[in-house]
Image: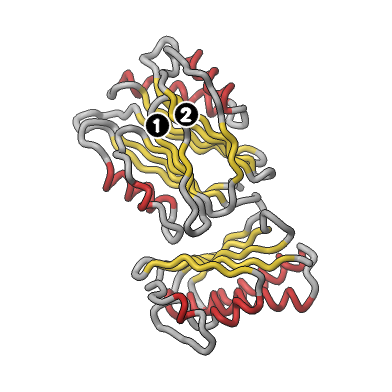
Amino acid sequence: MSCLSWGCAGHPLAGESSSGDRGVVLPFPGGALVAVIDGLGHGKDACLASERAEQVLSGNPAGEVTELVKLCHTALRTTRGAVMSLASFDAERGTMTWLGVGNVEAILVRAEPGASAEAVAMRGGTIGYMLPPLHPRTLVVHPGDTLVLATDGIRHGFRDEVRAMREPQEIADAIVANWSKADDDAYAIVARYLGLVDATKIDIGGEADVAHVRIKTRDAAHGLGFAGPDVEAIATAVSEIVRNVVEHAHHGEVVLRRTRDRVGLAVVVRDRGPGIADIARALEDHFSTGRGLGCGLSGARRLVDKLEIDTQVGVGTVVTIEKWLR
């Protein structure tokens, strides 16, 4: 199972049958490699350069990013060359190491509300012709952090397309639809970090799923060593939130995973419902709303150690809760 959920979108320059822009997502034991490659120019020669780089990466997805760039540089010497940004996720350590050569934009949008996005340092150069000094950077990543790689056929400024309640494929489609240039190939990959590979995802579609999620939450809590009262506390909190997804949004998903910073259980509940117009009121005791997750939030908050809400009216809501082992 991959530590990422991802989507991609792109198109060639109008009038061309092939694109020089392409990307790969390559899971390997304990992690995954993500890369976007832009063969110089457009058309068949650009496509050949990017295809060759893809072949190199596919043959060694667990390789160190600097070495992968060097291997691509050697393989592309007989082509017109390419630019590329790539990122290697280590799910066991909770890190991402990234590197860019040329102008493939790469940003990491944090799941934590209000956190600043980070960007790869784009250095001039061409893989296959002249490499700049290579200085990869390693970042700590948390479940829900979202990586976007986009070629220069995508205009700058697409950051606001990245929203927690959107699936990666939706984000990629929106970036290409709304930010593509008319005079170049265009391509984007969006990869959301899920955390350790033992994370469990459960789709929500009806009342029966409330009981199913409660059972899975109990199992996960028991597996981490929680005692009976704490198991019931987090199972009840999750059940209340999921029940409101069923009632108000009708469909959604739950992700169960271990917390990163301390031993505990984290549960992420995401829906595409009407959203919460007033979070403060929704967290008040005895408050109920038909506009999204609201009923049960105050009670759920008292049962867990951490509860965060990311919502947008008309788009959906993401509730993240954590219970810590003591």
Q: Quadrant of residue 102?
A: top left
Query: Which element type, helix, strand or loop, lies under badge 2?
Result: strand
In this view, the residue in front, 248 or 282, is 282
Quick check: 62 left or right of 182? Answer: right
Kindly identify which residue carries mark 1. Answer: 104
Q: Quadrant of residue 238?
A: bottom right
Name the residue located 45 percent from the left edge and 68 percent from the top edge: 317
How many other residues sit within 10 Å of disc 2, few (<14), some (14-19) or many (≥20)?
many
Q: Give the residue type at disc 2.
A: Gly
User: In front: 16, or 171?
Assistant: 171
Q: Is residue 262 left or right of residue 242?
A: right
- Count of residue discs: 2
Whether the residues at callouts 1 and 2 have beta carbons within 8 Å, the answer is yes
Residue 248 image point, x, y percent: 43, 78
Instruction: Pinpoint residue 307: horizontal percent, then vertical percent.
Output: 58, 69
Residue furthest top in the image: 78
Asked whether the viewer can see residue 246, the reply is no
150 lies left or right of 262:
left
- Crowding at dot 1, Cα within 10 Å, few <14 / some 14-19 / many 20+, comes out as many
Any mark on residue 224, and which?
none
Q: Residue at x 28, y 33 (%)?
A: 12
Q: Which mark is residue 100?
A: 2
Q: Please, is residue 59 above or below residue 239 in the view?
A: above
Residue drawn 72% across the image and 57% down it: 262
Residue drawn at 51 percent across, 19 percent down: 133
Disc 1 versus disc 2: distance between alpha carbons?
7 Å
Specify whether residue 293 is in view. yes
In the image, residue 88 above or below residue 176? above
Q: Amino acid at mark 1?
A: Val
